[in-house]
């Protein structure tokens, strides 16, 4: 069976990390936690749980951070897991079986089930939210996107869709949801301002209504009850925010600071050794 490196990107995820790593069982041969700016003891907790922690102060987007984390992996396959995600025992067993038959170009797609304020969302275009998270380390990597990064699928990829859920607890409260939507909207503007020339403000309401209609009616969000209506409205609102951000950036407005972009005196990566392990060399971060 191929060996497996599990990568978790963190920033102040102490409240999530134990449940996330414990859900792996004995699936991982090594765990790499790439941490940036945590002030809640996340790196120390990760090391105590057996992870190898790399402290990377620079933030150049989630795609680049996944690339950096992959450079620290040493196993045959890489699996990316967010701190607010959990593997079920059924998914662990299915992953183990799939890896035992995996080839040099096999990519595993995991169906993700996301909860909104404690309610699983099975419609609105959110399920099954297949994420490409397990792949051969020397075969491919993620793109450079700031947010909503994607795994590159080279020609000849063997894509296998698994059946058991990856549980996603990304939105436990309203404040966290709104913070993420604001963050994603600003990152969308930053990602697109270099190849966009104009945004029609008059079309933004139409785009928002289209996003709501797609989520609530075409993707049957109404079957998720109150949560489906709330989420469909929120998806329409997100379209407004992301195009407003892009329009303002194209006009030269000050974007403010994306979390993680504060000036850093020491921009080199450091490593915390897992409890009971000998120190290992740190791979320099990608320039």
Image: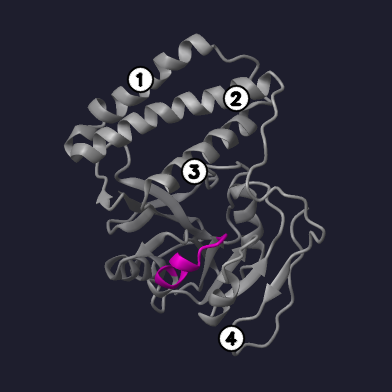
User: Is 258 on the left-hand or right-hand side of 109?
Assistant: right
Cα distance, mark 3 to mark 2? 18 Å
11 within the magenta span: yes
Q: Residue 67 location in percent, x, y?
A: 63, 55
The one nearer the camera, 26 or 15, is 15
Q: Is residue 23 above or below residue 235?
A: below
What residue is rendered at 81% in x and 61% in y?
Answer: 266
Cα distance, mark 3 to mark 4? 34 Å
Crowding near pointer 4: few (<14 within 10 Å), some, many (20+)? some
What residue is rendered at 25% in x and 37% in y?
Answer: 228
User: Is 216 on the left-hand or right-hand side of 96?
Assistant: left
Cα distance, mark 2 to mark 1? 19 Å
Q: Is residue 233 above or below residue 284?
A: above
Front tag of 3 and 4: 3
Q: Residue 275 location in percent, x, y?
A: 58, 86
Looking at the rendering, the stretch of residues picked out in magenta corresponds to: 10-20
Cα distance, mark 4 to mark 2? 45 Å
- Helix, strand or loop at mark 3: helix
| Residue tagged 3 | 179
Crowding near pointer 1: few (<14 within 10 Å), some, many (20+)? some
| Residue tagged 2 | 246
| Residue tagged 4 | 275
Going from N to C along the chain, the mark reached first, 4 or 2, is: 2
Cα distance, mark 1 to mark 4? 52 Å
| Residue tagged 1 | 210
- Helix, strand or loop at mark 1: helix
- Helix, strand or loop at mark 2: helix
């Amino acid at each position: 069976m191929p060996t497996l490196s599990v990568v978790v990107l963190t920033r102040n995820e102490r409240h999530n990390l134990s449940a996330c790593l414990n859900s792996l069982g004995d699936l991982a041969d090594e765990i790499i936690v790439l941490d940036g700016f945590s002030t809640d003891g996340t790196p120390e907790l990760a090391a105590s749980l057996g992870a190898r922690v790399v402290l990377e102060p620079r933030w150049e987007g989630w795609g680049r951070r996944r690339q950096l984390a992959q450079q620290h992996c040493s196993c045959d396959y890489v699996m990316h897991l967010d701190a607010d995600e959990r593997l079920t025992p059924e998914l662990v067993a299915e992953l183990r079986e799939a890896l035992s038959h995996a080839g040099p170009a096999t990519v595993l797609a995991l169906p993700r089930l996301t909860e909104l304020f404690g309610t699983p969302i099975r419609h609105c275009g959110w399920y099954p939210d297949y994420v490409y998270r397990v792949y051969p380390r020397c075969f491919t990597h993620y793109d450079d996107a700031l947010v909503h990064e994607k795994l590159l699928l080279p020609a000849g990829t063997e894509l296998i869709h698994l059946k058991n859920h990856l549980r996603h607890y990304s939105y436990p409260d309203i404040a966290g949801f709104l913070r993420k939507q604001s963050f994603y909207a600003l990152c969308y503007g930053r990602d697109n301002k270099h190849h966009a020339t104009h945004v029609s403000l008059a079309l933004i309401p139409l785009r928002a209504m289209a996003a709501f209609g797609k989520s609530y009616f075409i993707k049957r969000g109404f079957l998720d009850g109150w949560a489906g209506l709330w989420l469909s409205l929120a998806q329409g609102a997100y379209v407004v925010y992301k195009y407003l951000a892009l329009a303002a950036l194209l006009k030269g407005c000050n974007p403010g600071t994306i979390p993680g972009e504060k000036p850093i005196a020491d921009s080199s990566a450091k490593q915390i050794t897992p409890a009971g392990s000998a120190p290992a060399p740190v791979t320099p971060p990608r320039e």
